[in-house]
Image (spheres, rainbow, N blue to C red):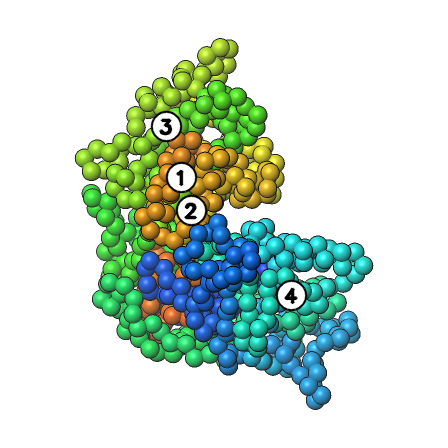
Amino acid sequence: MLNDPYPAAERGQNILYTAFTQQPKHFDPVQSYSEDEATFLYQIIEPPLQYHFLKRPYVLEPAVAEAVPGVRFYDAGGRELKSDADPARVAKSVVEIRIRPGIMYQPHPAFARDDTAAPRYMGLDDAALRGVRTLSDFAETGTRELEAGDFVHQLKRLADPHLHSPIFELIAEYLPGLKTLQAELVEAGKTSSGWIDVGDFELAGVEVVDRYTYRISLKGVYPQFLYWLSMPFFGPVPPEVDRFFGQPGMAERNLSLDRWPVGTGPYMLVENNPNSRMVLARNPNFRLDRYPCEGQAGDAEAGLLADCGKPLPFVDKVVFSREREGIPYWNKFLQGYYDASGVSSDNFDQAVTMTSQGEVNLSEDMEQKGIRLLTSVSPAVFYLGFNLLDPLVGGGKDASPAARERARKLRQAISIALDMEEFVSIFLNGRGVPAMHPIPPGVFGAREGEAGINPVVYTWQDGAPVRRSRDEAKRLLAEAGWPDGRNAETGEPLIIHLDTTPGGLGDKARSDWLAKQFRELGVQFIVRPTDYNRFQDKVRQGNAQLFFFGWNADYPDPENLLFLLYGPQGKVSYQGQNGSNYLNPEYDRLFDRMKVMPDGPARQAVIDRMVAILQHDAPWLFGFHPKSYSLQHGWVYNRKPGSIVRNTLKYQRVDVAAREQARAQWNQPVRWPLAVVGLLLALIILPALLHWRRHERATAVDVAVKRGAR
């Protein structure tokens, strides 16, 4: 195959081929927090827990832990309480995690030992590091068993002021010892210009019980903590690996945990070139892990239980190629050079068809190639946020009740006028569900049917939500003091500003659509595009007016979505995730109550009230919950939608022979153009050749005549 983009040596190998579009920035588990990084990191780092691959709703299960740990509650006097104790009585929650013995790390030079059993690659100087550019430049590697202390070491690293962990403030609220440790590390940094070993410090509330057991004591009640135990933030970092990368000269050579993560997972990173290619290879020391034998209804029929009990992982290597443009990505998928692909707006019509009832089916071309379509609603929300500190759309920080009420009606008017159904249809090819509130479908707290609509924006008619009319939006606009889009007192026009980044809603087609929506409301609309860093600064400082944000749920609990509008998470006052700087005392009280409640009718009632408050106050224009559309070739098995489950590569299997056959069939050399080119060349050359031959003959005759004349 002349167009094969991969080395010939890879043909026929048990490799999964995929692509990435955005460069991953952080692989250090203390810092990494984005989806493009999770694609790699979750295959390398194993936290104590993971989500069951197939079960929905999502279920936590042990990864390297022996079991999902229980939580014990204690009052202020140290007396243990019952599991259903009033959260107000709980002073401390204790989680004890026991790790399974015998789990080994991937081969790594930090574990290599010399003849005296001392670390072989410690105390290196510039001379020893000359010529070293990657981990493979170290001749020897080693391994060791996973221990409880490795998890405690990583927890201490959350406090490192140089690493800027994005979850520090949140976790420190329940683990106050982190702030104490951070202050100690700051002081230590004043007298040290080099790397500081966090292992030399204590972290109050965290202790190693024995080689395989550690204990975490949390302040108060935090039921969602177990979800965090499934994330790399709470995975293991061996102290000797930390020390290895902390040596002088390592960072200058891009040798760090941020580029070369170390773990016990099924794969290890063996090639890191974020500009072109990333490669994960099977960890030869990976523990015995087996494919699940149970799931949910329909999994068996979909073939998702066919590999029940088989050892994982199935593929030996995963090759990620960087694709900057969508068309080459799509073409390589159609040629069989990528095993799976998303569905973008550019190739949507080629990939799927929509019925009159809105059902999505594969196109005939895709079906003929044996391609399969996977769809699901992602546990995410995209929204247009209003900055409540802005005098126009929020009333301002010290606004009067009347001013806040006018701003609220303005936000409601805009929420009605901007037709999200139309936006999803035009710009997402229908790949989204209009949002009624922050909680996506499938997460506890999200109601369906008439009970689930936003009554400020929709009515319920003939069994479906119907957006309120533009006339209602104009009525609210007039009540806000802007009849027909002009100030009722001064006559000045109402101007709304959207702060955005290139590639966001500032793109011309989207901004033109937004301008049209506002124009029909009688409002002028201006886009203020800026680079990403400047945009983030504007939001942090409260200088944005409207902005477009999205949030992928970290774990399947409404707390992880409703906290985005929690007062103590205000962006300006607390550097939190509440970019709207929304503050409602009743909502905050209900949030404090809801977050510690178990799922059930009582918690649902509290969530219903919280949602009603948000719908009335409209701090967001609740945009949409994205639908995930994914295509895979028929030779790929064991892929199931569900973005909460991120360690999925170990479950996927490839029929290499079927792929090779399809590639050969779909990429046969097309020879007829060569024949056409040859014919054209012949037609061009033949007259010249005939002319040359006539000329030669004529010359020969002429010479003969002259000789005869002599």
Q: Residues within 10 Å of mark 2 (few under 14, many from 20)?
A: many
- Pick whichever of labels 1 and 3 is earlier in the sequence: 3
In the rendered structure, find residue 256 and report the number of the disc placed on it: 4
For marks 2 and 3, give the CA distance: 32 Å
Determine whether the residue tagged by mark 1 lies in a helix, strand or loop: helix
Disc 2 and disc 3 in contact, CB within 8 angstroms: no
- Three-letter code, disc 3: Ala
- Pick whichever of labels 4 and 1 is earlier in the sequence: 4
Quadrant of the rendered image containing residue 139: bottom right
Q: Residue furthest right?
A: 191
Residue 485 in the image: state x and y as whole percent: 43, 18
- Three-letter code, disc 2: Met
Q: Nearer the viewer, mark 4 or mark 1?
A: 1
Q: Which residue is mark 1?
A: 610
Q: Which residue is mark 3?
A: 417
- Pick whichever of labels 4 and 2 is earlier in the sequence: 4
For marks 1 and 2, give the CA distance: 9 Å
- Pick whichever of labels 1 and 2 is earlier in the sequence: 2
Q: Which residue is mark 2?
A: 594
Q: Nearer the viewer, mark 1 or mark 3?
A: 1
The residue depicted at 53 percent of the width and 79 percent of the height is 104
Quadrant of the rendered image containing residue 625: top left
Residue 141 in the image: state x and y as whole percent: 62, 80
- Three-letter code, disc 1: Met
